[in-house]
Amino acid sequence: MPEAAKVAEALNATLVDMRFVKPLDDTLILEMAAQHDALVTLEENAIMGGAGSGVNEVLMAHRKPVPVLNIGLPDFFIPQGTQEEARAELGLDAAGIEAKIKAWLA
């Protein structure tokens, strides 16, 4: 996701493309958890039951107390519009993603 790359560069963060929800790459998730103080998941799907939830489950199963911010679609009807309009409305554009991360880290 190009928006994520912009934010990662602005925040000097590591960006990992998980590509698939199933099977999750447990090794990669645990490696990132060991190397970072916090993790952020970002997806253009529902947060509930999505990739971010899977990351949370892997960390809990391995008793890794790493704070995780899950960013994605809320569990309600999404109004119609262009992809750019929807991303901006839901805070999934670069500005929205960066604002959510900064607020969470504050």
Image (spheres, helix red, strand yellow):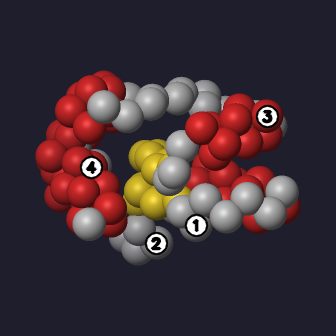
Compared to 5, does 44 lie above or below?
A: below
| C-alpha span from label 2 to label 3 | 29 Å
Q: Which numbered disc flags the more N-terminal residue, 2 or 1?
A: 1
Q: Disc 1 vs disc 4: Cβ atoms closer than 8 Å?
A: no
Compared to 106, does 51 lie above or below?
A: above
Q: Which numbered disc flags the more N-terminal residue, 2 or 4?
A: 2
Residue designated by label 1 = 48
Residue 100 visible in the current orientation: no
Say which mark, if any, is on residue 27: 3
Residue designated by label 4 = 97
Q: Amino acid at mark 4?
A: Ile
Q: Amino acid at mark 2?
A: Asp
Q: Residue furthest right?
A: 61
Q: Which numbered disc flags the more N-terminal residue, 2 or 3?
A: 3
* Residue 14 vs residue 75, the one in the foreground: 14
Which SS class for mark 3?
helix
| C-alpha span from label 1 to label 4 | 18 Å
Q: Total of numbered circles in the picture? A: 4
Q: Amino acid at mark 3?
A: Thr
